[in-house]
Image (tube, rainbow, N blue to C red):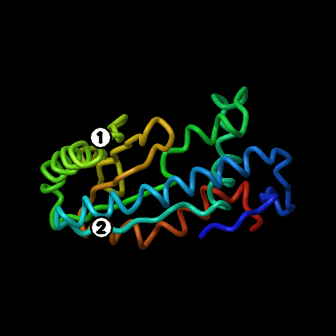
């Protein structure tokens, strides 16, 4: 069960900064709680399909870091932290693993159809094919779904080889990406 926190800490260039907006803390907690409630339905759907997958619910600290990082983007300058939170689509993240890269398109179609069939309150809102782009290190398809227009979540579909690549370098990538907002 989730802990009820009254405040939350963020890290910026070595100093701790508290969120002054308790509404933001509450919204982050609510989104994580919605993800926890939605997850069993997704797990059941994927298990019934017999696919290999893993999942995670993003930690509060990581959500807060993402908000701080996105705040620095020019297109986010006029947005509040709450508005930025609403744009984050991977609080709930699932990775489906197939045997071979060329299986990804057919698995993608099956997953989209099963999610739509089993979960009427979920709709596909974004599809990114990152398999065909030769410049990308990690090949995958990103599916962004929305649950009741309240909680977007991400399903990535990749093969074992690309998942191993991602796992090998993900920690370093994350450390570099969030260095400006983490207490390093």
Q: Position of residue 170 (x, y in %)?
A: 48, 66
Q: Position of residue 85 (x, y in %)?
A: 62, 42
Going 51% across and 39% down the picture, which residue do you hit? 150
Tell me the quarter of the picture where residue 116 sits.
top left
Distance between the Cα atoms at labels 1 and 2? 22 Å
Relative to 87, is 80 on the left or the right?
right
Q: Position of residue 153 (x, y in %)?
A: 43, 48
Going 18% across and 44% down the picture, which residue do you hit? 113
Classify mark 2: residues with Cα within 10 Å, few (<14), some (14-19) or many (20+).
Answer: some
The image's mark for residue 120 is 1
Q: Position of residue 78 (x, y in %)?
A: 72, 26
Tell me the quarter of the picture where residue 95 sits.
bottom left
Going 15% across and 63% down the picture, which residue do you hit? 100
Classify mark 1: residues with Cα within 10 Å, few (<14), some (14-19) or many (20+).
Answer: few
Q: Mark 2 — residue?
A: 53
* Mark earlier in primary sequence (1, 2): 2
């Amino acid at each position: 069960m989730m802990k009820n926190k009254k405040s939350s800490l963020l890290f910026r260039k070595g100093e701790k900064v508290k969120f002054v907006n308790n509404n933001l803390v509450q919204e982050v907690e609510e989104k994580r709680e919605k993800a926890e409630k939605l997850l069993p339905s997704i797990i059941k759907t994927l298990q019934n399909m017999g696919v290999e997958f893993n999942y995670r619910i993003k930690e509060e600290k990581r959500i807060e870091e993402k908000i701080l990082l996105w705040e620095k983007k020019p297109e986010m300058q006029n947005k509040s932290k709450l508005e930025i939170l609403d744009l984050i689509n991977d609080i709930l993240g699932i990775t489906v693993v197939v045997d071979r890269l060329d299986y990804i398109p057919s698995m993608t179609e099956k997953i989209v159809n099963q999610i739509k069939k089993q979960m009427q309150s979920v709709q596909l809102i974004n599809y990114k094919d990152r398999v065909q782009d030769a410049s990308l290190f990690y090949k995958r398809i990103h599916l962004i779904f929305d649950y009741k227009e309240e909680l977007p979540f991400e399903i990535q579909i990749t093969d074992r080889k690309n998942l191993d690549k991602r796992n090998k370098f993900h920690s370093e990538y994350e450390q570099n990406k969030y260095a400006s907002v983490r207490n390093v």
